Amino acid sequence: MIFFSCLARAEETTYRYEVYKQEDGAPVCTMRQKGVETKEQFLRIEVTVPAGSKLESASLVKQTTPVEVVSFPLDGISPPAEGGNLAVLTLERAKFGKRETAFLQVQMNTAGAVSPPIECKTAEGDSVSYFGEEGTSKTDSIDVSALEFWLGNESTLKDNLLKQLKAIDDKEERILLVHLPSGAIASPMDNAVSEGEWIQVAFLLPETEERMPRITSKNCEAVNTFRQKEAPSAKESKNDPKEGPGAKPDERARPIKFKLVPVGQMFRCGAGPLSYEVHPLSGYEAKRKKEAGTTPEAASSSVENVVTARVRPRYHLAATAMVGFDTATTRRFETDSSQLVQEVTDREGLAVYVGATWMVTGVDYEAMTELDYFLNVFAAVKPTSPTEDAVVGLAFTYTGSLSLALGLSLHKNTRLTKGYTVGSSFTGDGDIPTEKTWKGMRPGFFVGFAVDSNIYDALIKRF
């Protein structure tokens, strides 16, 4: 369709939002990147949605009297690609009508269940201006060239930079947060990372550029290296653009080659909000004015390039309850009709155990890896005889917190005391004297179903 080609060459920074679930399971929407008014015929908005969910509907609610709601058409709501979570909204200028401030409102569809309308506003709860004066865009086209170069060479640029970083510091894995020359986010980029992952901020710059931008003021929680239960997360420049050494106007018609360079030190964060300020090089800054209605002083200043993201918790330990079948033999002693001591054997059969599961590599329930499905070690005991019956093994999980438990059960052995042996005559009163001992313990195979204490968090984040 024609409007896609228009969008691909748009020179504005895109508005970006994220819908995610709070600890109580209620979905909320927050603005992750404040864009600038579009000067084109079509508005583009990016919305990151929870895994397994999609946008049921979306609309812009104008702040007019009476309130006017402009819905995005069905063909203007592009669902996430398979395995992704980035939805794209597009709206024609003519459908929006008269320019007014508005806020985004969406409804989520998760496994057929449609949520109530969710309001997406700024952190201050304000509406924004999505459409600007038509055809008056002043944004430097260097960002457009950089984005086109990025979309065509993303894999190569990423691989080359990661190899360079690995040669310097052999970290196991890194996440790249990539920015355009102006400091805007290079789409597509995830708005959430896993706790403890190493993060490297990088910029796309012309190959001839020798200066380096910088980042400051990282809001980064401490990493919890052994999380048992989700800890509460923390409560969530004025320089005018100057001529710089970027591409000259008469050179911009020619293709520009870019390089991907790391900016600042690598870092990793604990669960909670992550934010940092980007300071692009002079000549590349994107001038963004405050919304209409602010004071003249505020309207004359640039909006800070603050990038925000969410760091997902990674769990390591959980209390576990299991029920299943235990093949270990049981042993008891009783007398026959002649009062002779006899040994009777049977199997443990149906058994219940309680204990703990250790997720060896740490599990992020929103982005489980192959190891997370089977590398989970558990140890448990029978609640009725915790010092006599135990089981250890692996929990094979399908969706996190719900697992198939396979393990080795160990049981104390029962043996006769006070000189009694099998076949001897029992002349005393009461029970035959026996004792429990780990000598000659009885092993068995246990297979069962396990549920751990992270079940609520796991299901909420999965579905």
Image: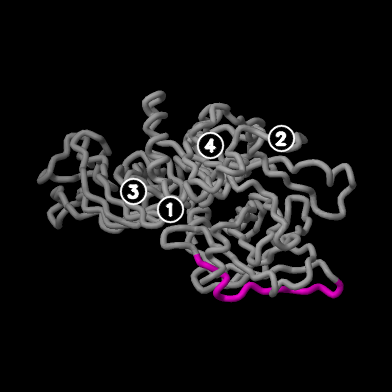
Q: Which mark is residue 401?
A: 1
Q: Residues within 10 Å of mark 3 (few under 14, many from 20)?
A: few
Give the CA separation, mark 1 to mark 4.
Answer: 45 Å
The one nearer the camera, 313 or 13, is 13
Q: Which residues are magenta?
A: 65-79
Mark 2 secondary-structure assignment? loop
Task: Name the front one of labels 2 and 3.
Answer: 2
Mark 3 secondary-structure assignment? loop
Q: Earlier in the sequence, mark 3 or mark 4?
A: 4
Give the CA separation, mark 2 to mark 3.
Answer: 50 Å
Give the CA separation, mark 4 to mark 2.
Answer: 17 Å
* Residue at x-position 62% and y-position 41%: 182
Give the CA separation, mark 3 to mark 4.
Answer: 36 Å
Q: Is residue 66 left or right of residue 370?
A: right
Looking at the image, residue 143 lies above or below residue 22: above
User: Does the magenta segment cover residue 67?
Assistant: yes
Looking at the image, residue 136 lies above or below residue 203: below
Where residue 302 sits, quadrant-wise, is: top right
The one nearer the camera, 386 or 217, is 217
The residue at which mark 4 appears reads as 205
Q: Earlier in the sequence, mark 4 or mark 2?
A: 4
Visible residue check, residue 330:
no
Give the CA separation, mark 2 to mark 1.
Answer: 55 Å
Looking at the image, residue 456 lies above or below residue 204: below
The residue at which mark 3 appears reads as 370
Q: Which residue is situated farthest in the front direction here?
A: 250
Q: Are marks 1 and 4 in contact (CB under 8 Å)?
A: no
Visible residue check, residue 97:
yes
